[in-house]
Image: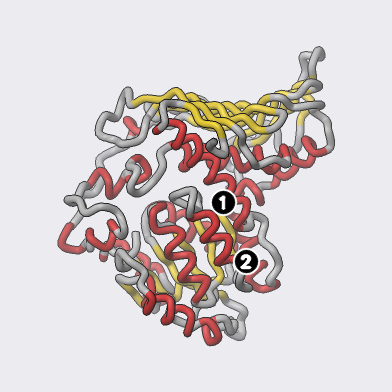
Amino acid sequence: MRGMSPQIDRRSFIIAGGMTALASTRVLGANDTLRVGIIGAGGRMGDLMSVADKVGGWQIAAVCDVYAPRRDAVKQRSNGGAASTHGDYRELLQQPLDAVFIATPDHWHVRVAVDALAAGKDVYLEKPVTHTLEEGATLTKAVRSGKQILQCGMQQRSWSHFRDAVDLIHGGSLGRIPQVRTYWWQNYLAGGPRKSVDTQALDWKQWLGGASDQPFSEEKFYLWRWFWNFGGGAMTDLFTHWIDVVHWAMKSDQPTQAQIFADKYTFQSWDCPDTLQAAVRYPGFDVVYEGSMASSIDDGGLDFRGTEATLKINRSGFSVYHEGMGNVAPGKDVAVTKGDSFRDGTIDHMHNFFECIRSRKEPNAPVETGVTAARAGHIVNLAYHRGGQITWPPK
């Protein structure tokens, strides 16, 4: 999580804007090592730092989190414990940094990213890049009105077999595609005991940010994705990844209708439904999604159902099944499993981000991809709140 005030006042923007000229000057050392600030030091940030270690050519220069133990753990991980520590992300943005990684709860994403861009920092922003529909325009304007690099955490865009599959679809090998099936099952019942939170070391008020004041909740602290104040449930945590692949492969990202059939069958304390079936209509094709948070068999994936062939893809590989032949025409990396040969595409995604920091080229997942993917999830959630269906844009 991260430390920051619940409101961004005019002075905050003046401070951030005043840093732009200085901070936008590259601070790379003679060895071309990127100096990176860590904002939000929870579980996903641990994954990102491990991926960055595999890429190399970087160092942790500063860390911000509103929970001291997480802050201190990242400091210890930095080179000789040299990273500066901060409870307020705006203090971190005053440091000489090339970039920041942002892996806060969703309700902080746009606020922190906009300030980081204004301070001249390049940004790796975890998905979903927005917490509300309205934030999409704010984030896009912040990126496109400046010269900073923003890579959205949509790592499939850099994953080799996803790129190969999309090329195959673009080449017309599947024929016309009227339907895409997406799914993702996880089992939150299988999680072990969590570490108790030392509330004396946590700035809960800062963690809440602009959310309504409420007493500390360990469940919300750890499972914030499932509470509307902080996340958007399965549609923004999981579906966002898959709908981005659909937008990319189908060259279409403007939904016209959404329907959802969902409920809380297992986790009554959550705000968001734990069991979902949804459908989103695009011009010429439909996308369906199903998932549950109480069963993990099959994990997640997509089926592109074409008139000539069907392509099934997940994070391990893909296969193509031709109509009427009953056999498999394998694509690259078919039969790759999550074993020794499995390579997390986030490594290549981070490598692409680092390369773009140096070259100033457009990253593989620019802001528009993250905004439209998050928007699709927000639209389905809006349908959930409006009785199960919605036409988009609303009449």
Question: Pointer 1: what residue?
Answer: 371
Look at the image and tell me in which quarter the N terminus lies: bottom left
> Which residue corresponds to the image point at 61% horizontal and 85% vertical from the top-left?
30
Disc 1 residue type (three-letter): Val
Please provide percent x and percent y for residue 271.
31, 36
Colour treatment of the image = secondary structure
Quadrant for the C terminus in the image = top right
Instruction: State the residue at coordinates (71%, 39%).
Output: 249
Crowding at label 2, few (<14), some or many (≥20) Cα neighbours within 10 Å? few
Q: Is residue 384 above or below residue 137?
A: above
Q: Is residue 182 left or right of residue 362?
A: left
The residue depicted at 53 percent of the width and 45 percent of the height is 375
| Residue 295 appears anywhere in the view | no
Q: Most extreme residue toward the front, as rendered?
A: 395
Whether residue 177 is situated above or below residue 271 in the rendered picture: above
Which amino acid is tagged 2? Answer: Arg
Q: How many marks?
A: 2
- In this orientation, which residue lies closer to the viewer: 389 or 366? 389
Does dot 2 land on a helix, a strand or a loop?
Answer: helix
Q: CA distance from mark 2 to mark 1?
A: 13 Å
Task: Indicate the position of residue 194 as horizontal and vertical percent values.
Answer: 26, 44
Instruction: Tell me if mark 1 has few (under 14), some (14-19) or many (20+) residues whose alpha carbon lies within 10 angstroms of its own.
Output: many
Camera-nearest residue between 210 and 394: 394
Q: Horizontal placement of 118 versus 316: left or right?
A: left
Residue 193 is situated, as x and y percent measured from the top left of the image, at 25, 40
| Residue 390 to residue 101: above or below | above
Residue designated by label 2: 144
